[in-house]
Image (cartoon, rainbow, N blue to C red):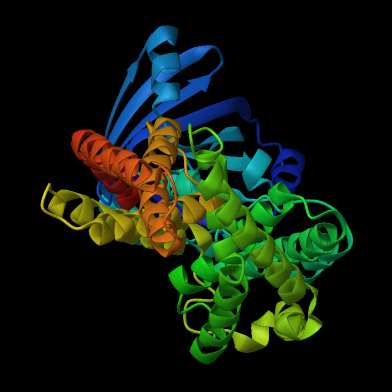
Amino acid sequence: MEIERKFLLKNSQILDFLKDAGVVFKHLEISQFYTKITQNEEIRFRSEEGKFIKTIKVGKDLIREENEEFCEKAEFKKALKNRIGRVITKDRYIFRLNNNPCNIDVFKDDLNGLCTFEIEFSDENEAVYFKLPSFLEQFCQADVTCDKRYKNKFLAIHANENEQIDYKRAYSVFKNKEISPNFAANLKSGEALRALFLNIFKEIKRLKSDYLQDHDEEILHNLRVNLRKVRSLLKIFNGVFDEKVTLFFGENFKILANSTNKKRDLDIFLGFLSEQKHANELIYFVQKALNLEYENVKSYLGDEENYAFLKEWEIFLNEGEFYRSKLFDVSLSRLGSFKLRTLLVLAQKRLKSLDQDCPNESFHKIRIELKKVRYTYEFLSEIFYFDGLKKYEERLKDMQEIFGALQDYDVWLGILERLPVAAGKEKLESKIYKQIYKTREEILKKRLKFIKATRKISRNLKIYYI
């Protein structure tokens, strides 16, 4: 049984004090990670002094059962690939206080600046009534024995939630320099979203300007994606910012993104027609429609009134803390895992209900859900680490593309329906219908494996709720 008390230190100055007092330390450089984390159990792998140790701990707070054994380097490396969260690195200084084993941990890398003091006891009574010696009190900030935020397993997935972060300085850097933010698990969700939205805002302004100059289709595509991404994330992370503000900006981003829908659809359809035989007459009509839509888009994007709300958006980004709501201060790892898992569960349910009799509209709703999952995952990808995540990202992209193709075929039928009678029209409609049936079959064939993979990712995200 492991019976210990843990204290949060103000800094590492206690080491100098103890050295001057004649305390002799044993110094270890430790690297550790976890392959299982629950409320009441953990499996930890640790390397120190060239040795590799596997530890299973059961229990929490003051008393825990600990089972420890040496393992081979090969087992350690294999476990590293299947770890949950970050690898924790720290310097440990071991000594004795009144014959009680003690250690001071000075954390490094992502947890740099965090220092803790632990003392072990032979029985529970001694631990409960232990009082810090007065000469140590000046170095201690708090007793964190029962504070789960300072458990190593918690730090591995959430980092140090009490770390003081200079958000104003960070925001100023993002605003004035061309860099992309790299999000940490312990950031406040509201501050992380503000930084992300600022980065996207700068990109939207650049893309709009470039498109009006060059009229490049790839630029327009990227502009559409960024507009939709902001709108989706505002909706997904509802509760972080004021509800009225969220609805106002969400609706405006939607209108702006939708202004390019027809042109995008006609562009894709024209590409398809150009590969078909005997489609010259249809190509003529579609090209005419595309030319008209091109002028509409150019006119819409060139009218500054349609972008007037972006000035208010910039004010919001600069003063986002004034529009905070109840979820603003929740850590990104906690809220992000909940939001992403909610999207995965919904997508999983809808996929499960799909069958041959479902209308295409049911398939299109899932396409939208998968897009939301992808936007959210891209935002949070740096803060999650567990087995299968990268592979799932590839599966997600593949499924999204298949659903997207089905949506395109449906749109093409709608375009054909509005076009005048032309040679090859009926044959082309028949060909598109065949592609729709084929794509639906492919989705239904792949969905069970995708549901299984989604369920696994969803389960792993629950770990971040602890």
Q: Is residue 337 visible?
A: no
Residue 227 place in picture, x, y as percent: 62, 65
Residue 21 place in picture, x, y as percent: 72, 43
Q: Up-down: is 32 above or below 466?
A: above
- Residue found at x 66% / y 62%: 196
Which quadrant is the C terminus positioned in?
A: bottom left
Q: Is residue 192 visible?
A: yes
- Residue found at x 12% / y 48%: 355
- Residue found at x 48% / y 43%: 156
Q: Up-down: is 58 above or below 241?
A: above
Tell which of 87 and 241 is nearer to you: 241
Q: Would residue 96 be found to the left or right of residue 362 on screen?
A: right
Residue 22 place in picture, x, y as percent: 71, 37
Q: Would residue 369 be found to the left or right of residue 106 on screen?
A: left
Tell which of 234 and 36 is nearer to you: 234
Which quadrant is the N terminus positioned in?
A: top left
Residue 84 quadrant: top left
Residue 53 quadrant: top left
Residue 334 place in picture, x, y as percent: 43, 60
- Residue found at x 66% / y 82%: 321
Q: Would residue 42 be found to the left or right of residue 449 on screen?
A: right
Tell which of 281 and 183 is nearer to you: 281
Q: Report the number of discs.
A: 0
Q: Up-down: is 311 above or below 77?
A: below
Q: Up-down: is 145 above or below 297?
A: above
Residue 256 quadrant: bottom right
